[in-house]
Image: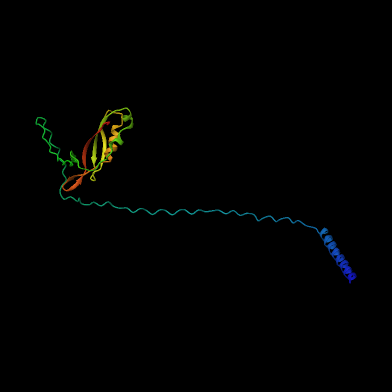
């Protein structure tokens, strides 16, 4: 059995070698012939003819129409003003006077809702250390809630911080607001704040 397989293999190998040799022989004996390419047919020229654009339409002629004037009366030019007579005194022209806006009332005797208690804590530290006394005058706007918003109008002596300290004190004050026709209104108040060492 093993001998038969070996014989079959040998036969198969011989047949394969013969076929390969025949294919190789056929490939080597082939000849290739190159054929000349045919020339293309002569080109024919094509002439492009562009059509003429169409003519634009003729514009319509509109004849002007004469209409009648809208004013039935003839127009007259304005007459020149009469020249000024410089010998006469000028006349006074009355201009309407606008009513002045109501000024906020000035509070002179305030009724306080709230005041700070310990004023010594507001004393400027540098002035206290140098034993300097002074005062500040504030110009305050009083809101309808009675709160003060103040600007320093005067401080003496200057440069020791009495104005800024007085403003801090004023922010702690709340007064009963000024009234006009039963309504709370904004007002003005001038506050003098003394600074004394005890």
User: Which residue appears farthest toward the right when viewing the image?
Assistant: 3
Q: Viewed as shown, does residue 136 lie left or right of 44? A: left
When the figure is inspected, residue 17 is found, relative to residue 191, above or below; the finding is: below
User: Which residue appears farthest toward the bottom when viewing the image?
Assistant: 1
Residue 51 at x, y percent in the picture:
48, 54
Quadrant location, the C terminus? top left
Q: Kindly tell me whether residue 155 is visible in this rendering.
A: no
Label total for image: 0
Type of colouring: rainbow
Which residue is nearer to you in this view: 75 or 41? 75
User: Which residue appears farthest toward the left when viewing the image?
Assistant: 88
Quarter of the rendering containing residue 186? top left
Quadrant location, the N terminus? bottom right
When the figure is inspected, residue 196 is found, relative to residue 29, above or below; the finding is: above
Residue at x 29%, y 32% (from the top left corner): 162
Residue 166 at x, y percent in the picture:
27, 35
Residue at x 33%, y 32% (from the top left corner): 125
Residue 113 at x, y percent in the picture:
23, 44
Q: Kindly tell me whether residue 163 is visible in this rendering.
A: yes
Residue 132 at x, y percent in the picture:
29, 28
Quarter of the rendering containing residue 157? top left
Which residue is nearer to you in this view: 46 or 189? 189
Which residue is nearer to you in this view: 98 or 96? 98
Quarter of the rendering containing residue 86? top left
Which residue is nearer to you in this view: 53 or 167? 167
Residue at x 18%, y 48% (from the top left corner): 183
């Amino acid at each position: 059995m093993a001998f038969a397989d070996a014989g079959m293999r040998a036969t198969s190998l011989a047949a394969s070698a013969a076929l390969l040799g025949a294919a190789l022989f056929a490939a080597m004996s082939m000849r290739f012939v190159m054929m000349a390419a045919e020339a293309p047919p002569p080109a024919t020229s094509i002439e492009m003819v562009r059509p003429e654009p169409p003519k634009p339409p003729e514009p319509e002629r509109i004849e002007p129409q004469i209409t009648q004037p809208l004013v039935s009366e003839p127009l007259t030019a304005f007459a020149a003003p009469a020249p000024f007579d410089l010998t006469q005194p000028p006349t006074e022209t009355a201009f309407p006077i606008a009513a002045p806006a109501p000024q906020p009332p000035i509070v002179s005797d305030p009724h306080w809702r709230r005041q700070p208690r310990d004023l010594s804590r507001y004393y400027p530290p540098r002035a206290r250390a140098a034993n300097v006394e002074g005062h500040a005058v504030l110009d305050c706007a009083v809101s309808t809630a009675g709160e003060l918003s103040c600007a320093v109008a005067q401080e003496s002596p200057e440069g020791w911080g009495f104005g800024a300290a007085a403003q801090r004190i004023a922010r702690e004050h709340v007064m009963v607001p000024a009234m006009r026709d039963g309504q709370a209104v904004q007002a003005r108040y001038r506050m003098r704040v003394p600074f004394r060492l005890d």
